Image: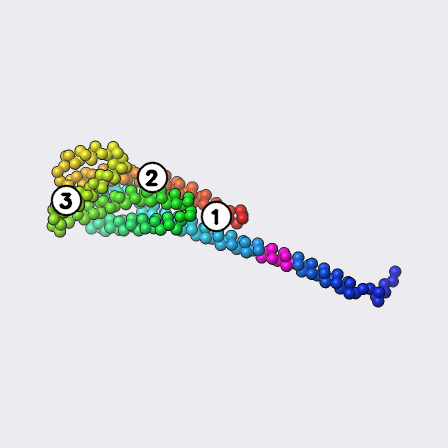
Amino acid sequence: MSIDLYTIDWTAIGSIATTIALIIAFRSINVSNKQNRENRKLQILLIRQEQEQKRLDEMVNNILEINHSIKPIDVLDFSSKWIEGSFTIEDRRKLDHMADQDLLNNIQLNIQLIKLKNYPTANILLTRLNSIREIYGQWIRCINPLYVFLESGNKLKAEEREMIIAGIVKQMAETCQRINPTCKPIISDIYKQNNKIEDIARDVMNILESEISKQIQVLKPAFEKELYEFVKQEQERIDRIIDIE
């Protein structure tokens, strides 16, 4: 069979070739656009994953720092020294630092609760930690001023000093009874058996240190276990962000 080159419709062939080229180009562009969309989606997911990880890490670091600063042994140690009258200048400095740290912890927790208001599981955890901090802070807010006013000597009038100390003792008594209602008759007996407010303060502090340290020793391990489970679940969720989308 012979082919006459003059009889071939080169225009038609050119049109077909152009059409094929356009189809190939369109498919290439479509594939490229799809890849770009997938790449953008992946980038967005990676950014989201990074943000979620940063938020979790920041929250956990703050929680661990606050949790570590709440030590039942400090409650027992410093309370005993104050009751026995063996406070040193160094003890006083440490107590001031603990009071400052408790104030800072309270601020940090409140900021975290505001920042993580749309993070329900985290809010539950932070609220629980704040309850422990509040118990510990109650002790700090009692022993710190008690030391100051009992050691104030002639700087304050006796009546004024006794009135301030009586107010602090009332706070301690209310805290003890709130933690453990069975303390109420014991504290009533302390008031009956002592005439000096200083003696009442020391006896009530003896009860307060015991109740608060016991409460913290119960609550902290339970909280730490809950923190572990929370971090485990959140980390698994963050690791799955790319896979589930």
Whichever of callouts 2 and 1 sits on the residue coming sooner in the sequence is 2
Alpha carbon separation for disc pair 1 and 3: 57 Å
Q: State the residue position of label 1.
A: 238
Whichever of callouts 3 and 2 sits on the residue coming sooner in the sequence is 3
Q: State the residue position of label 2.
A: 219
Q: Quadrant of the N terminus?
A: bottom right
Residue 158, image x, y percentages = 11, 46
Taking the spot 29% from the left edge, 48% from the top edge, the residue there is: 102
Residue 218, image x, y percentages = 33, 38
In the current view of this chain or complex, which residue is farthest to the right?
1
Which residues are the magenta region?
A: 28-36
Residue 86, image x, y percentages = 18, 45
- Is residue 2 visible in this depiction of the protein? yes
Amino acid type shown at disc 1: Ile
Q: Residues within 10 Å of mark 3 (few under 14, many from 20)?
A: some
Identify the secondary structure beneath mark 2. Answer: helix
Marks 2 & 1, CB-CB < 8 Å contact = no
Taking the spot 19% from the left edge, 46% from the top edge, the residue there is: 146
Residue 162 shows which numbered tag? 3
Q: Is residue 189 above or below residue 18?
A: above
Give the quadrant of residue 9: bottom right
Please state if 137 lies on the left or on the right of 146 as rendered: right
